[in-house]
Image (cartoon, rainbow, N blue to C red):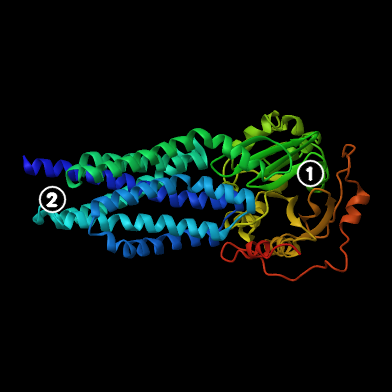
Amino acid sequence: MRGSGQRWWRFLLLVSVAICAACGLVYELALISLATSTGGGGIVETSLIVAGYVAALGVGAVLVRPLLRWPAESFLAVEAVLGIVGGFSAMALYAVFAVIGQSVVALVLATAVLGMLVGAELPLLLTLVQQGQLVDARGAGRVVATLNAADYVGALLGGLAWPFLLLPLFGLIRGTAAAGLLNLVAALFLACVVLRSRLSRRRMWVASSGLVAGIALIVTLLFLSPSWVVTARQQLYADPVVYAHQSQYQDIVVTQRGKDRRLYLNGGLQYSTRDEYRYTESLVYPALRNKGERVLVIGGGDGLAAKELSAMEAQIVQVELDPEVIEVANTVLREDNGGALEGDNVQLIVDDAFTWLRKGGDGTRFDAVIIDLPDPDNETMARLYSEEFYTLARSVLSPQGRMTVQASSAYSTPDVFWRVRATLESAGCGEVVPYHVMVPTFGDWGFHLCAPEGESLSLPPDTPPLRFVSEETLAAARVFGADNQPQDMEPSTLDRPFIVDDMRRGYR
């Protein structure tokens, strides 16, 4: 009976260890997700979180040594603090971002605290085993190995639960809070079932009360976080937020003041209805030769490019990664794009553009390719500004086809702008024509035309009346001031994504 009881205790212990390990990894993944959604976090932020977390695990294992005399009490205390801190971490960092902006210091501090708490778990559990409190001495070695296995399996479960369950169902902040709640419940179960015979009545009451109080705090966060998030999010935007949603890929926000509606992705402005036509007309029409052409749009999930193309009776294939953006375009932003993405002339493909092109697209050639993507402020976006990507995009163009690319601000971020030109040239464009126009919301904004050798900017002969672009506008768009002349630069590639460093150097 004694052996059976020990096996049952050991099983419950391993389950609790796996749950706690899963929650620990969820906290780390939540930090990475938060860094991405609030600041476009790339390799630098991810490396700081991952390396800092691993280092903090070691620090936590060292710092917990004075507490090894009371392993059961200390383990429960660590779990109580970890559940509360981890559960509130995303909310706290989001509030910091809303008040002062992206803070690497806050991110590193949160990583260190969570890592040290998680690092303290295993030494305390191993001490329980080595003291023979849960198994006899002969089985201690086997259980030590099993504890490690349970820890790793739990981490795997946490790694799968975050992207496939918690984030899609609850969102970033409530998903992290849900992990904190599970962490505390698992610790409370461990205290009441597995460790109750190892604790005095007083210590049991203290531990249980602390864990229950933590659970109450997390439950409060789960219920109140939507209103808190709305309040914090509004601090980020000058205009009232009318729609907000955290998709699998990004934070989608729409604001509106009067007739001015704006779309933000991960905090970055994508367009304003005040002047988006200047941007969209400048991007779309130089890529076209005639009405009725077959056009590939990469990105452009807001539907504005499709709206202009539909006016030219184009047959559109549009590749967009995030289905949530398409949903927003067809509902919240429908007045702006006229429902263009639901037209019979549009074939929507939800896929990663790089992967789709690498597979050969749809096996046909296009008369034009329009690349309308957010700025390359992280390595994920830099893939879509690389020589390899532009080469793939050119491979689906007809011999006389044209391709236009948005290239950030020609004035504020000249390194990015001229880097795109160098990359297009390296990708084999016969003629790369840089041009820029004034979009008041964005400033001096730049584009590049990739065309057969010897061609220049022009409008198709049957262009409908436009609000901004004309032949005269395009002629002026070719002219750059003495303070912004072409730069000789290396192309940005998958191996050397120079364009991310260009963005991180900031604005001129």
Query: Eyeballing the image, is 323 above or below 390?
Result: above
Which label lies toward us, 2 or 1?
2
Answer few, some or many: residues within 10 Å of disc 1's Cα (few below 14, many 20 plus, some between 14 and 19): many
The residue indicated by pointer 1 is 280
Measured from the top left, where is residue 413 in percent x and y?
74, 61
In the figure, residue 367 lies in which quadrant? Answer: top right
* x 21%, y 57%: residue: 127
Q: Nearer the viewer, residue 315 or 221?
A: 221
Compared across the picture, whether 236 is left or right of 41 comes to right
* x 59%, y 40%: residue: 322
Compared across the picture, whether 286 is left or right of 12 comes to right
Q: Secondary structure at mark 2?
A: loop
The residue indicated by pointer 2 is 135
Q: Secondary structure at mark 1?
A: helix
Measured from the top left, where is residue 407 in percent x and y?
73, 56
Which residue extends farthest front?
202
Q: Can I make out residue 86 in this image?
A: yes
Which residue extends farthest bottom?
488
Label 2 sits on what residue type? Val
Compared across the picture, whether 199 is left or right of 350 comes to left
Q: Nearer the viewer, residue 392 or 30?
A: 30
Query: Eyeballing the image, is 334 above or below 39?
Result: above
